[in-house]
Amino acid sequence: MLAPRLNVQDLAGAFHYFDAQTDDARLVLRVLREAVAAGGTAVNYISAIDLIREEGQVVGVQLRDETTGATTAVRAKIVISATGAWADELRQKVDQEPRLRPLRGSHLIFPQWRFPLAQAVSFNHPLDGRFVFIFPWDGVTLVGTTDVDHSDSLDEEPHITPGEVAYLMAAVESRYPSLALTLDDVLATFAGVRPVINTGKADPSAESRDHVVWLENGLLTVTGGKLTTFRLIALDALKAARAALPDMPKIDEDAPALNEVTEDLPDILPEAVRRRLIGRYGVDAAALVAAAQPGELGTIPNTNVLWAELRWAARSEGVVHLDDLLLRRVRLGLLLPQGGVALKERIQALCQVELGWDAERWNAEWQLYRKRWEANYSLPPRDVIPDWRTMLHKPETTPVLVNKRGRGQTAIAAGLLGTAVALIVLYLGLRKRL
């Protein structure tokens, strides 16, 4: 009943636990805007191209504006590199050896009407025992993730590979065969690169996801870890920076990660919509609603996104290119067929004036957005995607991304984890009864 349509033919048992989810881009934007409101400065489309060193110690950064090409130097008491998978590039400028192992995680997105799911489901992949998650997210159903070494240049946006598509489709087919899902049902794809500390393990999934803080010749690098512990990671970085900032106020580690929002939104909006807007936009939610024009507090068809969110993002959230707006400020590029092509005219009518673009600029940006969507957010050519059904029936045809060498260990570890959690749940249940 909790997981309808799930294939239970070989199911020995399951456990129910509670987790949370977020929109990573909106979380980053909310943290940035709250930091600016507190007196910080945030810049967009600026690259750190070099480090300024004096007597071997880092004392600043050379920056380049990627829209104009202009460069400038910024000096500081402490330079913190929180550049994720790119951290080694700056570390090498202070004569340090690479220590990261970039790992790619890719995902498939299905319409929720085609892949109905009331809550998240996690299970072991039938080919290598890795955990796979399928969960409802912002009006769609998301399947992920893979975990493979990423050898492409970090200067290029990552994209899902044919083997990863087949791997994820095999997971879907194994647990939801009655849905008869095909590639025609895939709305979009996306991929990201994790900054994982390299310990040389054969199986990428066996690498630790712990975060690290390194102080090397004046450069403070914080990398690794996961989004769920972003505030803990930030606190560890600030503690390491205190030696260079003796006047830093004492940090209240019990303070909430985000500013409290005390102003409620109009009652004309359903409670779920009010909660969604406040969570994503914080104190800006009220201004977003006030800026809406007639009809813009309705949702964009087949999404949870309000038309007003497009206007607000175009007006207030530092959009430089159209893909900033449609892939990161709001997620229409992931939520709508073909990235929202059918709504092009309505999007243009709402956003073009807010962005201050003439027709020529808008058309150029739309073409660039479509090109990026096709390259990085759509499926690879169908004829190069392996047959996942054959993979399930003939595991020897498994693509390279499944690490057979670590398969047994991964499956054993997953089984032990499941057993441990089940025992904990049983123990807590018995304690409660007693």
Image (spheres, rainbow, N blue to C red):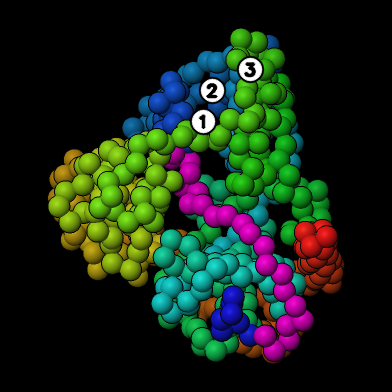
Earlier residue among tags 3 and 2: 2
Q: Which residue is mark 2?
A: 61
Q: Is residue 131 above or below residue 347?
A: below
Bounds of the magenta segment:
8-30
Assess whether mark 3 and mark 1 are in contact (beta carbons under 8 angstroms).
no
Which residue type carries mark 3? Answer: Lys
Residue 373, horizontal then vertical, whole percent: 39, 61
Which residue type carries mark 2? Answer: Val
Assess whether mark 1 and mark 2 are in contact (beta carbons under 8 angstroms).
yes
Distance of label 3 from label 2 (alpha carbons)? 27 Å
- Quick check: can you spot residue 126? yes
Density class for disc 3 (Cα within 10 Å; few <14, some 14-19, many ≥20) is: few
Mark number, residue 48: 1
Relative placement, left or right, of 31 versus 320 is right
Q: Is residue 265 above or below residue 375?
A: above
Q: Quadrant of residue 411?
A: bottom right
Q: Dot 1 lies on which element?
A: strand
